[in-house]
Image (cartoon, rainbow, N blue to C red):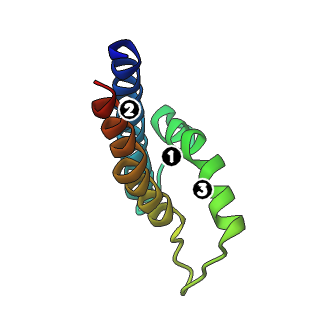
Amino acid sequence: MFILSNFLLAVAQALNLVLWMYMWIIIGRAVISWVNPDPSNPIVRFLYSATEPLLYRVRRAIPIFAGGIDFSAMIVLIAIYFLQSFLVRSLIDLATGLR
C-alpha cells in the first residue's frame, strides 16, 4: 500500500505545483491588462494564450458586468484556491491514511 500512498502523494504535489504556477500566470495576465501591453511581445502572447481559453469559458458561463470590470480572473483564482484547499488536501490525507 505504500506504493499507492507515495503515488497519490506525488500526484497531489504535482497538482498543487501546476495550480500554483497557473495562479501566478493568471495574476501576471491581470497585471499586464492594467497597462497597454504590446501584443507582439512573446511574454504577453504567452500569458494570453495560456489564460484566454479558461477565462473565456468563465466569462461566457458567468457574465458579470460591473461597470466594465472583468471578474473572470478573480473567479478562476478562487477556483484554484478551492482546488488547492479541497482536492490537493484530500489527496494528501488519503495518501497519509494509506500508510
Nearest to the observer: residue 68 or residue 57? 57
In the displayed structure, does residue 82 sit left or right of residue 64?
left
Q: Is 23 situated above or below 13? A: below
Q: Which x, y percent locates residue 45? A: 55, 38
Q: Are marks 1 and 2 in contact (CB under 8 Å)?
A: no
Q: Tell me the tag on residue 6.
A: none
**Residue on which the image places disc 1:** 38
Q: Tell me the tag on residue 12.
A: 2
Residue at (43% x, 46% y) in the render: 87
Q: Is 44 situated above or below 29? A: above
Which of the two discs, 3 and 2, sits closer to the camera? 2
Q: Amino acid at mark 3?
A: Leu
Q: Earlier along the polypeptide chain: callout 1 or callout 3?
A: 1
Nearest to the observer: residue 17 or residue 26? 17
Nearest to the observer: residue 1 or residue 16? 1
Which of the two discs, 1 and 3, sits closer to the camera? 3
Identify the element where label 3 is drawn. helix
10 Å neighbourhood of mark 2: few (<14), some, or many (≥20)?
many
**Residue on which the image places disc 3:** 55
Q: Amino acid at mark 1?
A: Asp
Q: Earlier along the polypeptide chain: callout 1 or callout 2?
A: 2
Identify the element where label 1 is drawn. loop
Q: Amino acid at mark 2?
A: Ala
